[in-house]
Image (spheres, grey):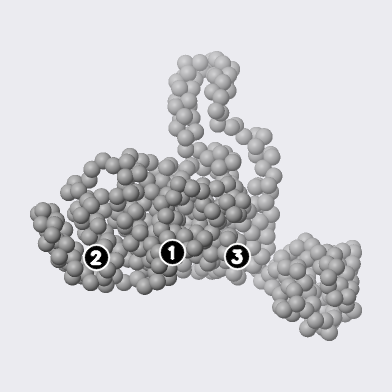
Amino acid sequence: MEDQLATPKHLQKPEFAELVSLGDPTGVGYANTHPPSQWLPEFFFGQLAGNAKTYISLLSTLEKRKRLPQPIALYAKALFDYYSSEPGATLLNQIYQRSVTKTTDNTYGALKRADLLRKHILDPGAEHRTKKRRSPSKTTTGEKTGRNTPHAITSHVDQQLEVEEDVAAEQDELQENDINITPLEHLSCEEWNVDGSCVMCLCMDYQLAATAALRSGTLLKANTADYAILAGVFVPFSATALMKNVFSSSTLKAIRKNVSISAPDVDIDDSVVQTAIRLHANGQHDDAAVHLQNLKNMRMLQLFGTALSNLPLRPIEVSEETLITNYVSPLLRTFTHYPSEEIIAHFPNTASTTQVTLNIKPDRPDFKVAWEDTEIAFGEVTGMAQKSDKRKNGWDLWRLLRFGKAALEAGAASVPLVQVVYDLGTIWNMCTPVRGLYIAIEIGPFMMPTHLYAVGGLQASLAPLLWLQVSSIRLD
Ligand SMILES: [Zn+2]
């Protein structure tokens, strides 16, 4: 029985099947990894590789490739000519529709989302024209009040409130040139499926919602994840209201579990550090130093020895620079500085070389680890004064994600990131779980001791730091 919805017999050319293999790329996406026998739309749609438009554009690109072996080029042209013709196009759509219903497919939804997203991001015109911009110039507010004379008194009060809100909003609100929007898209919903949901589709919905928020001026610097997704970076560990609108809490939980990385076990005698803290607090510094020798591990000895002899009994006010020099630097160096391996921890005052190389607007990290000329890890530090400034800390995390994304684009498989907000640090790992999506995975928090007794907290939270040591340095 002949299938009514199939490529006509004369265009089915199984004999070409083996002509193109993985080792002989055509230079054209799908066709690179699929032999000509699978260039038929039945296969193409069956593999969730795209829609009718994608298919035609594949053929048209193939047809124009000058370097294809002649029989292959002729075959591509024959397919293109037929499926661009009127009866061909009709058949193509029918084959596509069948594949969509057959798989009750979420690919169709995915492609529709991608289209919608592209429209939103690349052609925001309509929304822009109707939207009331939050004005840097306050005159619009004034004019409006003038027109609303019957309500002049209440309007005046409203106007005051509105102006105050505007000032706060302007500090927090993101402008479009703060973020490079990178539209997410994917060809298949099979790539990363968690609990029956396509994570990429959800991320696209989330990006769409964040784009709308950016355009309406409601995207805030405090909500890092919401602008990270605009740049294609997903931060499921830092859920925002917007994210929770798109992802159910169980899906979010499953995604976190899916990507989470367990930090190594800590093999250190708790009592040694506790005793040394007590001795220091008593002023018995030499005894403390002798007692610490029981730690055996040279780096741990160095870490706790430095911390205990550097830290005051109570937190004292220090600038961000002093915090970095006296506290953060010795701590992070313990886990990342291996000069004999040419792995160097830097607290540089220079732009990221990776960003410079990639021609991305460069920024200066507070901390970075470089292996020879390659930047392999980054850190940002916030001082005591701005500890509670959610905007500043959100923006720091964003800068870290930018460094990480650039390093991944430059070829790294994963990039550790460290954010220190005065006395609390967080370690992240960035990688690309599926093509086109970047993800920041929280490894865990650690205590950044700013006074003697807090060293106990550091000791209790060493696991993420040991992960940092193992993963950025790949040494034991
Ligand atoms: Zn999908």
| Labels 1 and 3: the sequence-earlier one | 1
Can you tell which mark lies on residue 343? 1
Q: What residue type is labelled 2?
A: Leu
- Rendered residue at 48%/27% (across/down): 162
Ligand 1 has an atom within 8 Å of the beta carbon of the residue at disc 2: no
- Rendered residue at 31%/72% (across/down): 265
Q: Position of residue 359 (x, y in %)?
A: 61, 51
Residue placed under numbered mark 3 in the picture? 435
Label 2 CA crowd tier, 10 Å (few <14, some 14–19, many 20+): some
Q: What residue type is labelled 1?
A: Ile
Secondary structure state at the residue bearing disc 3 = loop
Report the front residue among 47 and 308.
308
| Labels 1 and 2: the sequence-earlier one | 2
Q: Do the residues labelled 2 and 3 touch (CB within 8 Å)?
A: no
The quadrant of the picture occupied by the N terminus is bottom right
In this rendering, is residue 227 above or below 88?
Answer: above
The quadrant of the picture occupied by the C terminus is bottom left
Secondary structure state at the residue bearing disc 1 = strand
Label 1 CA crowd tier, 10 Å (few <14, some 14–19, many 20+): many
- Rendered residue at 78%/79% (across/down): 20
Q: Are marks 1 and 2 in contact (CB under 8 Å)?
A: no
Report the front residue among 369 and 9.
369
Can you tell which mark lies on residue 301? 2
